Amino acid sequence: MNILWDFDGTLFDTYPVYTSIISKVLGSTVDKQEIYNNLKISYLHTIDYYKISPKQKEKISFLKKSISPRDIYPFQGVEEVLKYADKNVIMTHKRKAGVLSISKFYGWEKHFVDMVTFDDGFPRKPNPSAYLYLHKKYHLDLAIGDRELDLIPAKELGIATCIFQGQSRVADYQIDNYSDFFKLDFSHIKVND
């Protein structure tokens, strides 16, 4: 099985770190859970929702540079799914340097045959261009993400979809933890070679 993965909130639990940074910039009057919930929609949505100024964006960018891979943790059990897959690819809006830094810290670069990041110039999700590029190269069977935004492009291309720790009207599968992955029935998916 060839799997396309989202990065933030799917492979790694990055939202708590980003929530903390945005909370520092906005101040203690803004509820951290609300920030977290908005980030789960998207980073751009969060910027718009809080009407974050250019000066605040600069401060967020500065604080993001201080994030260490030690501050970001993989979700429990996800590495077992990575090992199970024949091929894994990543499609993320994150910069490649950040993805590589975290992947290398955990020794996970060996699990991925390719990745498309912000630096590759593809339009943002839910535009399917990056998914189409990866699908043509690797004949993807499944896309896993934590937001509907991650699944819509896969669904458009006829790739099965799985939502992680969320709800989605376009998801073929839903899991709250990666041990549940192995309980899913993939018999209706025609697995590509």
Image (cartoon, grey):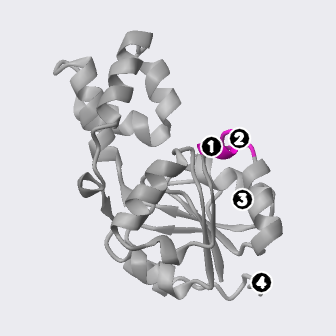
Query: In the rendered view of the protein, which quadrant contains the N terminus?
Result: bottom right
Element under disc 2: loop
Query: In the rendered view of the protein, which quadrant contains the C terminus?
Result: bottom right
Give the label on residue 119, or none.
Answer: 1
On screen, residue 107 above or below 40: below
What's the residue type where badge 1 is placed? Answer: Asp
Read off the residue under disc 3.
154
Where residue 167 appears, as percent x and y from the top left, is: 50, 54
Q: Distance between the residues labelled 3 and 4?
A: 15 Å
Left-right relation of 101 to 26: right
Q: Quadrant of residue 186?
A: bottom right
> Does the rendering let one see residue 53?
no
Element under disc 4: loop
Element under disc 1: helix
* Earlier sequence position, callout 4 versus callout 1: 1
Give the label on residue 192, or none.
Answer: 4
Where residue 43 appears, as percent x and y from the top left, is: 47, 34
Read off the residue under disc 2.
121
**Residue that lies at the very extreme toward the left in this rendered image:** 28
What's the residue type where badge 4 is placed? Answer: Asn
Q: Which residue is drawn at 73% across and 52% down?
A: 130
Q: Which residue is drawn at 72% across and 39% down?
A: 123
* Earlier sequence position, callout 3 versus callout 2: 2
Q: Which one is in front in this view, the residue at disc 3 or the one at disc 4?
A: 4
Q: How far apart are marks 4 and 1 (CA)?
A: 28 Å
Characterize the local packing of mark 2: few (<14), some (14-19) or many (20 or more) Cα atoms within 10 angstroms.
few
Q: How far apart are marks 1 and 3 (CA)?
A: 21 Å
Q: Is 122 in the magenta?
A: yes
Q: Distance between the residues labelled 2 and 1?
A: 5 Å
Part of the protein shown in magenta: 118-127
